[in-house]
Structure formats: structure tokens, C-alpha cells
Image: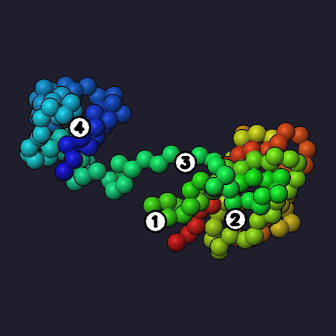
Amino acid sequence: MSFEHISMFIRGYRQANGESLQALADRSGVSRSMIAQIESGQTSPTIVVLAKLAEAMNIRLGDLVEPPKGSQQVQVVEPSEENIVSKRDSPFVCHQLIAKAPRTPGDFYRFYFRDHGKTAFSANVAGSQKTLWLETGELTIYLANEAITLKESQMVMFNASAPHRFENRAGALATGVFFVTYRD
């Protein structure tokens, strides 16, 4: 049991709900000073106190006392030469920032055009979906016999299991992000 998790959880719950120490004390039957001591890490609460707090917060006791798996891991990722997945001589540069793994639902990419041009993608696996948000510029996406033109600050979602391509032929160079999700 992580008392640091418990103190942060209770404080976070109260702040997210705009609730005072006194309001939680009134609902739980646990004194205001005891809750303050738990939140500041000055005391380790008994299981009876934790059960009262969990009931007052309308959560399971297990959710209060056990941090979610992997919740203590923070990963900062940024574009670099090492995570470029596009061809080196292409006007289109694509960084894979997150790859599908057991705790992630798909792949996440940042892209930009360094020159006007185009790029093509093979079909992703059946049932995959691509969601693209265009930060700057204008981008045309070709899907089979359909052309979709996105302008800055627009987003599109489409079936990525068909071949498709992006073109940035004129105007400001396109930049944005996309992620690919997969049905399991």
C-alpha cells in the first residue's frame, strides 16, 4: 500500500470536485484534521478510516489504496533523429513517438513537410484507423478515389487499412500529428 498515492489521491479527488476538507469530513465521518494529516503524509490511516473515505468518495477501497499499474512511470518523448520513420530524402519527415504496446492503444506520430511534395503509406492492418490533426499549412489526403483537403487546425479520421497518401503542394508547409489505432 502506498501512502503517498493515498494522500495524493484524496487531495486530487477533493480539488477535482471543488470539495473542502470539512465537506469530506462531514460525509465520511473522518475528522477534518485526520484527513489533512493523511493528505500531508503526516499519518498512516487505518483500514477503517480508508474504508470510510472510499465510501464517501463513492469509490472502491482497492482503487484508493492501490495505485494503477504503471501510474508512477512518466515518459517524456520528443522528435529526434533516432525516431524518424520516413525516408531520409523525402520532403515528408515523420517521427514515431509511441509504438503500440500492451499499455498503449496504437502508434503516435509527429510529421512535417520540409519541402512541398507528397508521401505514400501502405495499408495498415485491417480494422486500423488513422486520426490526423493538422497544426499548420494545408494537406490533401488521398484515399482510394477520394481527396480530402485539410486546413490548419482541422482533424480527420479515416480507415487506414487502405493505401493512402499525403500531399502538401503549395502554401505553408504542413505540420501535424496522427495516431493509428488497432482493433484487437
Query: Counting residues from the N terminus, which is met first, the one under dot 2 or under dot 3?
Result: 3
**Residue type for callout 3:** Val
> Where's residue 46, x and y in %?
8, 43
Q: Secondary structure at mark 4?
A: helix
Asked if residue 70 lies left or right of residue 27, the reply is right
Query: In percent of the image, x 28 and y 40: which residue is there?
Result: 9
- Badge nearest the viewer, 3 or 1: 3
Q: Residue furthest bottom?
A: 126
Q: Which residue is mark 1?
A: 102
Q: Secondary structure at mark 1?
A: loop
- Badge nearest the viewer, 1 or 2: 1
**Residue type for callout 2:** Asn
Q: Are marks 3 and 1 in contact (CB under 8 Å)?
A: no
Gap in angstroms between the C-alphas marked 2 and 3: 27 Å
Query: In percent of the image, x 83 and y 52: which residue is there?
Result: 91
Residue 26 visible, this angle: no
Q: Which residue is mark 3?
A: 77
Q: Nearer the viewer, residue 49 or 123?
A: 123
Q: Which residue is mark 4?
A: 7
121 over 9 or under it: above or below? below
Q: Nearer the viewer, residue 49 or 44?
A: 44
7 over 160 or under it: above or below? above
